[in-house]
Amino acid sequence: MIGCCPPEDPCLTPPLIVMTTWPPSLGRLNLAGMAGTLCRSGPQSSEEEGLTHEAYLYELARHEEELRLQRRTERLLRQSGLPREKTFRTLNLARLSPALQLQLERLKSGAFLEQACNVMAVGKPGVGKSHALAAVGHELLGAGPPVLWCSTASLVQRLLAAKRDLRLPQELGPLGQVCLCHPG
């Protein structure tokens, strides 16, 4: 419910906003982050911080955008199948040669995706191939493109089942939108 400004000076007195109507409205507009921030801090916090109405609205929108990015990243991480513990923070780069460290830095940028280049990790068991590629997958997820982490055998089985069930085009469609990582 929005109140009315006094007729004598409509420009100097802002409309009175009843807090109980804003959060549901923002929720219906899929702006849950804004609604949550507004409920926690309230519009009076903008006055306490010395923000103009435009600056406060900008901060609410920025917060909403951050929350949406976090939710998107979390959703993509869940869908990717990437092992959560295998990131660059947990990868011991000191064990790797300087040339390999440089190559991993290049892979983190995702430039190879634009050129549609394949990346293969070859080496003895236990040297960190899967960990390194999972870490690259985590970095790519943070930058935007979806990632699928699955073994080659499970991917082939999935595609063979889709072919058998005459739904291969439907199965291949989403795979064209993701970066594929094949451990093992």
Image: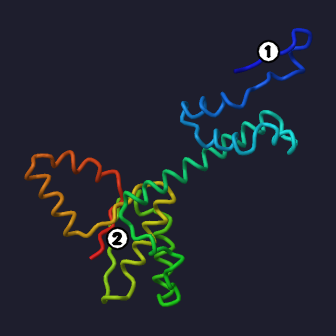
Which one is nearer the viewer's eye here, 29 or 98? 29
Residue at horizontal 66%, vertical 40%? 61
- Quadrant for the N terminus in the image: top right
Q: Residue sitting at 79 percent across and 24 percent down? A: 16
Residue bearing the label numbered 2: 119
150 is higher (above) or lower (below) than 93:
above
Q: Is residue 27 left or right of residue 162?
A: right
Residue type beneath disc 2: Val
Q: Quadrant of the C terminus?
A: bottom left
Report whether 140 appears left or right of 16. Answer: left
Checking the image for residue 156, the label placed there is none
Q: What residue sits 53% from the left and 89% below the top?
A: 94
Q: Which residue is mark 1?
A: 4
- Relative image position of residue 117 (x, y in whole percent): 35, 64
> From what the image shows, is residue 34 above or below residue 20?
below
Q: Secondary structure at mark 1?
A: loop
